[in-house]
Image (spheres, rainbow, N blue to C red):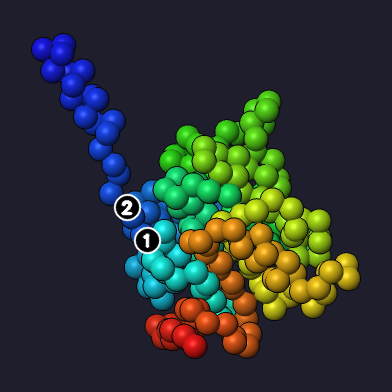
Amino acid sequence: AVIDQLLEESLDSLRFEKPLTVSEWSDKYRRLSSRAASEPGPWRTSRTPYLQGIMDALSSNDPTQRVVFMKGAQLGATECGSNWLGYIVDHAPSSCLVVQPTVEMAKRLSKQRLQTMIEETPRLREKIAASRSRDSGNTLFSKEFVGGMMLLTGANSAVGLRSTPCKYIFLDEVDAFPSDVEGEGDPCTLAERRTTTFARRKIFMACKYCLMEQQDVLLFTPPLKWWMLVK
């Protein structure tokens, strides 16, 4: 009986978890806090169905490398990006970079949204130590987890945009980015250079307006329309 139990436990450890899309992961594991959401509790993609295609294009098994969400105010782009970051930590670990228009806004996002998401979502709480713990690897601008690290910076900081290579990049409120950062050029270009060594990179850009001349891009505009642009 003991041998059978040990064999069963060994087989369980070899079974791979079924690959999930970002929307599936969010519906299954993401929890919203009353401090950051008007409807606390489990995340439900059905409440914002126009986000499903965007999130799923960010999934590790989707070939799309660059997703652009052109939208109005308060349509869930940052929450969509937060779901993707949680998915990365728990389901597709690697290095990722989050860029807000300024360093101060990156600090605010970390405190008010990401830290709350980590605390309220058990799957993330298990993988990222509490920020108050000594040597936790969880600070305002850096969150370590098994298999990767999440870095946060502002588009106004050239140093933050040109350091560690990253497989995943979330560029939020791109229309508020400066056109040039400290004389080193466009912040989006500086950030994206950090992904060049990764064959299956993912870049998510959220903005109120933009002109796209990129190839292999998914461009989404709410509520339910999307275009695949391929040159």
Q: Is residue 173 above or below residue 138?
A: below
Residue at x 59% of width, y 73% of height: 206
Q: Is residue 228 left or right of residue 128?
A: left
Q: Position of residue 222 (x, y in %)?
A: 47, 82
Could you tell me if the residues under marks 2 and 1 are in contact, i.e. CB atoms within 8 Å? Answer: yes
- For residue 15, side relative to residue 149 (left or right): left
Q: Is residue 126 above or below residue 110?
A: above
> Which residue sits at x=74%, y=53%?
163
Q: Position of residue 91 (x, y in %)?
A: 42, 48
**Which quadrant of the structure image shows residue 184?**
bottom right
Amino acid found under the numbered disc labelled 1? Asn
Is residue 101 visible to us here? no
Q: Position of residue 81 (x, y in %)?
A: 53, 62
Front in this rendered view, residue 75 or 96: 96
Seen from the viewer's position, the closer of residues 211 and 117 is 211
Query: Which residue corresponds to mark 2?
Result: 19
Q: In the displayed structure, would residue 11 be above or below residue 159?
A: above
Instruction: Say which mark, if any, is on residue 61.
Output: 1
